[in-house]
Image (spheres, coloured by chain):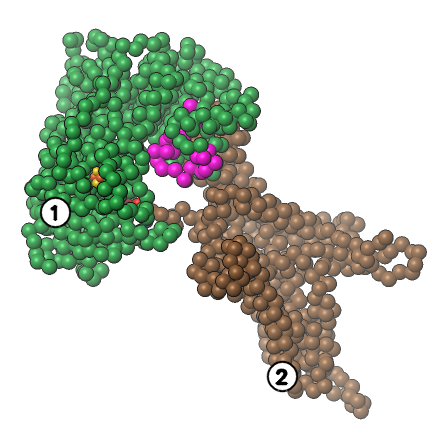
Amino acid sequence: MTLPFQPVILWSDALLLMLLAAVAAFVLHTLRHEHLRAPWRAVWDSRLGMAAAVVLAAYGLIGLLDSLHFRARLPAAAGEPPQYAAEVLSLFDHLVGPLRTQVEESYSAPFATHLFVKKTLVTADGRVVRDYPRLKYGGAHLPDPQGRWADVAARGIEGAGLGSLLAAGAWGLAALGLAVHRRQPLATALAALARERTLKGPRAALLTLTLLVLLTGAVAALAPHYHVLGTDKVGQDVLYLALKSIRTGLLIGTLTTLVVLPLALTLGVAAGYFGGWVDDVIQYLYTTINSIPGVLLIAAAVLVAQVHIETNPQLYDTAAARSDLRLVFLCLILGLTGWVGLARLLRGETLKLRELEYVQAARAFGVTHARILVRHVLPNVAHLVLITLVLDFSGLVLAEAVLSYVGVGVDPVMPSWGNMINGARLELAREPVVWWQLAAAFLFMFVLVLAANLFADSVRAAFDPRSGRIA
Amino acid sequence: MKRDAGLLRVQGLRIEVATAAGWHAAIDDLALVIGPGECLVLCGESGSGKSLTALALMRLLPEGVRQTAGTVWLGDTELTALPEAAMRRLRGGRLAMIFQEPMVSLNPVMRIDRQIAEALRAHRGLAGRAAAAEVARLLDAVGLKPEHGLSYPFQLSGGQRQRTLIAMMLAGEPEVLIADEPTTALDVTVQAQILRLLKRLQRERGMGLLLITHDLDLAHDVADRVVVMYAGQIVEEAPRDALYTDARHPYTQALMRAMPAHGQGPLQAIPGAPPAVGAAFTGCRFADRCERVQPRCVQEAPALSTVSEGHRVRCHLAGQPAAARTHGPAQGGREQWEGPVLLQVEGLAVRFPIRRGLLRRTVGWVRAVDGVSLTVDRAETLALVGESGCGKTTLARAILRLIEPSAGRVLLNGVDLTRLSSSALRRARADMQIVFQDPYGSLNPRLRVSEIIAEGIAALRPELGRQARQRRVGELLEQVGLPQDAAARYPHAFSGGQRQRIAIARALAVEPKLLILDEPTSALDVSVQAQILGLLEALQARHGLAYLFITHNLPLVARIARRVLVMYRGRVVEAGPTRQLFAQPLHPYTRLLLASAPGQGLAAAVEPAEHGPDVTAGCAYAARCALAEVRCRRSEPPLAAHGEGRVVACWLAGPR
Ligand SMILES: Nc1ncnc2c1ncn2[C@@H]1O[C@H](COP(=O)(O)OP(=O)(O)OP(=O)(O)O)[C@@H](O)[C@H]1O
Ligand code: SF4
Ligand code: SF4
Ligand SMILES: [Mg+2]
């Protein structure tokens, strides 16, 4: 039996799945240890933190769906070996179908029915005029474009209505969970969810979710018939591009961690714990790295990657694989330049921990260095690592935008906010302005970075010893 | 409200703190009066609410703490009703406070004289030459030299910093000065100086002094009146002499028995622990720990009743003095014990490099431990005393080879540890373990108690299986008096005393013959200290353990150790059997230490010179020694025998 598709695992997909597995393991470990769970309870109680977590989860879901790649099987005559399309699609592409395929000729404004640029048209009676043509898809179902706002409103409300059903379902499920957990009747649990002070965090999460679902419902109802955020120069739907860029942003923000973490942990902790010449060497190393301008290193590395891809085309059979490799390279080099801050922090903390009496007591028992590091040092720096990584995340998302803008970021054909902004900058000079591409990229990036920062803040507050009781 | 004779009057003070389960009273219906020129000492164990009281008077309560009732009158001003701006002017002016840790109250990047001048400008509007003259006068008043005014806080010693802070507080000419544990972070000798200074200033200036301490002996030296607090309430209030001769509250009586300086019997611990904030009380708050508890006590809360002029007690039995207690047999003692030598340290030295400059070149050495020799016999307790920074902890760590010694030998059962390879050393360490001072820093917060205790067993006796290890953990918990369910919990669930028990269990896990106890009780309350010492003594009797007990608390030494070693700047200056050494100290430094110990009046102590410049030749103590002569500065006195196992390093000790 042959599948109707051939799964494709890009490098970044594999790394992302690895990362997810690690996060899942971390979560399980945390859940099983009371003292690890305790600080998270403060996050759970924080309204902003929980709302931000829901937004992040929504982004994460889209990013994940967009990371499950496949090549569709082409129709083939019976008996022949199956043939697969050259284009690599993701599950996300598949789900949003029309968004991807409804490509116009060029720019069109949000909810437009006509193209943004004039074309030479031949009218029904054979005259040749220059005018704005109707779009192929956007509002094409309307006999009279005048009525489009009524249509937009009607469809939007209908979609939001469907969304509200989903939201009600979510509230119901949450209440059911609470009722089972507390052994209360469902109505009591629902009332508690709506009012109880101790549930303010989860309530904020549910409210955010409701908002998100309503918005998604409306957009989903509109998207097959309109270009909600307009189209770009080659007629691609901007909403689609902005959504596709989520994966790129998330990958840059998280895969870099895979490089930063081992480097910073081993080098920072080793420098602090062993001291002496080990410390000298590591300090020398990171001081050196820190004194090279990061952008130069990144530009050089991206160039090397580009040359490598061009000289070995046989290794990368699809366009997706090529741009993916460049992305992975970018993460690698961002990681190689980005571990210094965390390593320095860990060195300082380990220096302090090393002198603590429980470490001394362990040494008095003759416990080996490796065991001391694993049992006494690592668990006590874990919160620092966590806080730093979460804080760094938004910085990396922004860095991608800047790097792509100056042309040393991700592949120019890969959807990313940086590329969108880069593409939009020339059009800003037009009259009237083509603003939607830029606005969409900013909006999506802003929401992600804001959510990440709010979440990081509540994590930091939860782990900050100073927020506890003062002696 | 009518204005009264009292300078500072507190009435009906109630303070609540936020806990997970809402607001709970931490201070309940507290009343205080401090007259002009009077020293009132507020005494009580950790958590009894002393600091909160002081902070409430200053209106400096931290977040999560609020005052819900009560009035505070300073003269004819009601402080709780004052607008914040007026209160700010009053703080550091008419009402001033000094804290335990002077470093956090001083600005680290500002010269001392400038900081004092700033206080003068803020509270008395002085500037220019008038301010400079006043700064000089204040520095002199607190016993600092004019050149100290030109230094920055980090260049001063702890005692000098505390003096600076006092000078700053005096700048506003306060009517009442509050001092919250002003000497807890200081050595006994410096503590005596600071207390003498505070006392003198209080008398000279007719200032009210509210001193907060956990040390009843210290209270004895400075107080006119003493207030004892327990669980947020005043339990006894009395003029000083009345309290020390005729304490009526069972808690006060028990505290006195737990103080090492009183009596000679074994220290008597108060069973149990103080209640946590938020505990519900129906009767007396002390009932579950009280040895005289009556059925009535559990049902009915006692009120403060007056037993004599100015002596008030919160106890149903206040009218009946306790029967005089007989002390147990004198201890301090098993002097007859003569075991074989277990640990022998010969000429041990540790030096740390001083690094300077960009390349961190070594420009010199600090001799933290400088040729120390000592022996510990089987099953004996040897005490090691000295001020902070004299190298006690470094010595302990060097003996265990947690720090590599730079010279000398450490023989444990005749085997030289300094020559062992790291694997042989690991095995040898099973015989010698250490218990640290800080019960909070010595347990890894991320491990369960069972894992903490089992760590040593796993490292030194890997042949034991998981089950055998867990059984051993159970036994150890029982030996140190902890419940079995402690094994599954994390350290944060335990109090300081319980944590110290866990640390002792961890050290005992590998069945050592020698325990090095590095100030094991100095972070604990006296009642808990007595419990821990009782435990150590029981363990010694049961397992024949030897202790090297490091402490700065001299009265404690008298109660537990057979022999004492006095260290000064990395060297042993005097050693000998406890009783003889205490009865007739030969070295001037030992005499100073003994005279500075609280509880014997401040007059007894001789004022020592402040640390002079470091001497490179001759006697290390010469810079502070009142008896120093030319000979002392030229050559170093050797550690010479003075009969009966006593040794002294002083030219003037003379043969007896
Ligand atoms: N900021 C705070 N938030 C909550 N509870 C507090 C806070 N500060 C103090 N407490 C609680 O109030 C009670 C009294 O504390 P306080 O600091 O006054 O004790 P103390 O007698 O000064 O003790 P110590 O001798 O340790 O200084 C304690 O139980 C303490 O846990
Ligand atoms: S009232 Fe009763 S329980 Fe309380 S101290 Fe007095 S005798 Fe003890
Ligand atoms: S040798 Fe001299 S300076 Fe040293 S303690 Fe004795 S008398 Fe003082
Ligand atoms: Mg206090």
Answer whether residue B489 is magenta in the image.
Answer: yes
Q: Pick the residue in front: A213 or A234.
A: A213
The verdict on label 2 being within 8 Å of ligand 1 is no
Q: Can the viewer see residue A30?
A: yes
Which amino acid is tagged 1?
Ile
Mark 1 = which residue?
B34
Tag 2 secondary structure: helix
* Chain for numbered disc 1: B
Quote the CA–CA distance across marks 1 and 2.
81 Å
Q: Pick the residue in front: B184 or A392.
A: B184
Q: Position of residue A330 (x, y in %)?
A: 63, 51
Q: Colour of chain A?
A: brown
Q: Is residue A148 left or right of residue B339?
A: right
Tag 1 secondary structure: strand
Residue A346 is tagged as none
- Range shown magenta: B485-508
Question: Looking at the magenta stretch, what is its main secondary structure?
Answer: helix
Q: Where is residue B448 in the image (x, y as percent from the top left)?
A: 47, 36
Answer whether residue A437 is magenta in the image.
Answer: no
Which amino acid is tagged 2?
Ala
Q: Position of residue B94 (x, y in %)?
A: 14, 52
Q: Pick the residue in front: B193 or B488.
A: B488
Which chain did the renderer colour green? B
Mark 2 = which residue?
A150
Q: Nearer the viewer, mark 1 or mark 2?
A: 1
Q: In this view, does B600 lie to the left or right of A83?
A: left
Among all residues in the image, which is located at the extreme bottom? A125
Q: Is residue A346 above or below residue A201?
A: above
Mark 1 is surrounded, within 10 Å at the Cα level, by few (under 14), some (14 to 19) or many (20 or more) other residues, namely many
* Chain for numbered disc 2: A
